Image (cartoon, rainbow, N blue to C red):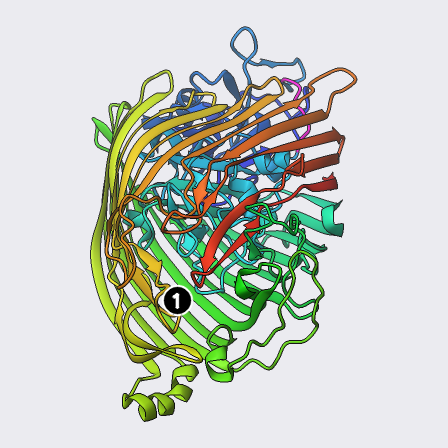
Amino acid sequence: MQDYRGRRPSRVSGNVIRLGLGLLAGTALASGQWVSVAVAQQSAVSFSIPPSSLGAALSAFGDRANLQVLYAADLARGVRSPGVSGNLTPEQALSRLLAGTGLSYRFTNANTVTIARASAGGATGVAADGTIQLDTLNVETNDLTGPFVAVDTSTGMKMDVPLREVPQSVSVVTRQQMQDRGVQTLSDAIDYSAGVSASPYGEDARFEQFVIRGFDENLLGVYRDGMRLPTAGFAGFRQEPYGLQRVDILRGPTSTLYGLNNPGGLINLVSKLPVVGAQFGEIWGSYGSFDTAQLGFDINGAGIDGTNITYRLTGLVREGNTQVDYVDNNRVYLAPTLTWTPNTDTTFTVFANYQRDRTGDTYQLLPAEGTLYPSVYGSIPPSRFLGVPGQSHYNADQYSVGYFFEHRADNGWTLRQNLRYASVDVDYLTVYPTSAYGGDTSILLRTAQQNDQTLGVFTIDNQAQYDSDLGFAENKLVFGLDYSNTQQDGTQNGGPLQSLITGTLPVSPINPYFPIYSLTIDPLINTLNTTQDLSQTGIYAQDMLKIHDKWVLTFGGRYDWVSTESTTQSPVLAQLAPLLKYYYGVNVPSYFKSNSADSAFSGRVGLSYLFDNGLTPYVSYASSFNVVPGFTQSSVTVDTAYGPLPISYDMQPLKPETGEQYELGMKYQPNNGKSYIQSSIYQITKQNAVSFDTTDPMQMAYYQTGEIQVRGFELEAAMDFENGFKVLAAYTYLHAEVTEDIPPVGQASIVGNVPERVPEHLASAWLDYTFQEGALKGFGLGGGARYVGATWGDRANTIYVPSYTLYDAALRYTKDNWLFSLTAKNLLDNYYVGTCSSIGNTYIGCSYGQTRTVTAQVTYRW
């Protein structure tokens, strides 16, 4: 299965042709008899193909033997090959590759071999006219969806390996799973996965937010095709799931291969890429809740004859609303991609994508009274909007361009270079409450804040892989050098600091129970300007030894050099400086610059044992390293009529965060590849953990809590029973605790407390069935349930957010080239609070989670 771009796109012509539309029984694939003297006289070739998915093994075989390999897509789906090594003729090598698969082969001429199901007698037959007798195969467009259960990944190792051989917990959400469940957002895609809290802040249309193994991974935990897409401030790269082929979730520290990150893990989004030589496509339209209409397309085809170019064009247009009044849900997404294959060993893929979002605040800070707690004024519905209609907005324009290059040499070496530049411009105007007047939540005082931010990310990853046979072991070595640079510029107007200058709020109060909306916002003054520049250079190496096809020893290390430069300019302090000088005789700076240069080593070591029945116990250790651009502050304040003002203010860079994990687990992946079950227990410890400093009078700084420890257990299963039934199931137990704390002056220690928005229990299950025959053939239905345990909304553990259970459902019907589907999230329309937080230590603001969302879709495929 194609993964994050550690390897070339699936080949359909050239050396391997995957017949996604099936091979019809009795079709003559060659004129004349299949027995070929040329085949019989072929000389021996040196093969070194490790055990892998059958598709990958046949691709490597075809390239090495310089043969066309014809096979139907469903023959290879989920099937594993034992691999082959040694100097063998192509016939000998292919026989070993197919051993135990129930498949056979026929040479139709000197350059072409066809794979088919073996007959009852153990071999396929040849008709009197020389045609090959093959089983009848279903017509399908497998390249659009792929299998329900993945068998391999390259996210966990930066090279393509079976899931069971990665010595950490790793999951794959396949395209087929996303289609069956009607996924509309990245949160939808990952909310049936173990160890992941998919919407810790409730419904939020601004950017991706999730927690993995108890740690917030919003800032650095999102990758696209193996390259980081960070979030800085309010600027983040919102992801369109229709542009993805799969979503990989790697749990635990990832710094050994990927550099800076929290120790919880990462999510790698694998793009749809051209399938070389194939021609297929789909176009679809949908309509659903909140008057949301969508039109999408995904087209793959060959370019100009003789150019060896294949293209893929994916796009989507959406216009609609959201569960919150006056908040739009509009998007344009376009992703063109070209792959050039000048020869069987080289691929060069150029890609681009553009996304335009026009939305707003679905994350509303509604008062706890009426949402989390009862209120004398009644309940507040999830549709309640606290902003200014027609003015509040979140507009984002993002794009990325880059390429993937791979060249495979005859001596076991493979060279890769992946490069991308991504940029996003955000215009965000938000109106939100700061307090309840006199404690009465029917009168909310509000402020307005506008943020204009740009974020640019350049990444290049150079990799070299060397595969060798040591006799007693198969060895896979990968090493590389990567570099990334992130630059962010931000301008903030308004916000709570504006009142220090004007003495008034720019927006009138609102009654959240019976709102009367104002349509104006007073002019907003410039209150904060920031820049951030982070550069990271890392060298890494990892070796994977498979000893006697049983023991798998993995060890690797990485060294990172990170430099950061942050500037903060406060026009508020600049305007207050004369006042502070006159009354207090102090000079308070308004411009701050923070530079840091850090370096660290990260490592991973793991040991697995491969039982013949598919069981794989493993144990591993991994460490993490993270540099957070920002600073701590120390200040002395005085109370004034305008609020607390600093008479001294100083900033210092944050210390790097570090982490380590011990993990023990068991995986089960049978040879047919139709099931993948994993369980694990682990302990993660994070030092120098960063939190926002609520005591900072300028609301710019962080503080470092000390240490957080998470101990957990996970169990996850993805199963395709091949009789129409498919199952997803997951359970997570998390015991998260602050074990050391150095709080800001005047704040109580939180040692022993649970970090915010970390549930103790998570559970989910999805059951899907498609009728295989009879009058209902083509009909499918599925249903699922998701449980999210109770969380705390604040560091002091005083805001308790209850648990909730949601139900989802799906119906579909496939007929010829048509697919009709109806999906529902939160089917029973359960109103629940996603999270709450304390604002200014006097007001508790809460945000609802996703309400019922129903989508009907019609798809035509060819």
Where is residue 727 drawn, in percent x and y? Answer: 55, 24
* Image quarter of the C terminus: top right
Amino acid on which the number 1 mark rests in the picture: Thr
Farthest top residue in view: 121
Relative to 33, does residue 211 appear above or below in the rendering?
below
* Quarter of the image where one finds residue 692: bottom left
What residue do we see at 59% from left, 44% from top? 277
Relative to 310, does residue 190 appear above or below in the rendering?
above
Q: Residues within 10 Å of mark 1 (few under 14, many from 20)?
A: many
Q: Main secondary structure of the magenta part?
A: loop
What residue do we see at 58% from left, 19% from top? 722
| One can see residue 470 in this view | yes
* Quarter of the image where one finds residue 126: top right
Where is residue 169 drawn, in percent x and y? Answer: 36, 34
Farthest right residue in view: 775
* Quarter of the image where one finds residue 655: bottom left
Residue hosting label 1: 486
Where is residue 430 drawn, in percent x and y? Answer: 58, 67
468 vs 274, left or right, is left
Total numbered badges shown on the rendered structure:
1
Look at the numbered disc 1 and give the secondary structure of its residue: strand
**Closest to the observer: 346 or 838?**
838
715 vs 471, left or right, is right
- Is residue 137 inside the magenta stretch? yes
What residue do we see at 44% from left, 48% from top? 799
- Magenta residues (range): 135-140
| One can see residue 45 in this view | no
**Closest to the observer: 473 or 732?**
732
Where is residue 261 drawn, in percent x and y? Answer: 34, 52
**Closest to the observer: 568 or 366?**
366
- Is residue 145 inside the magenta stretch? no
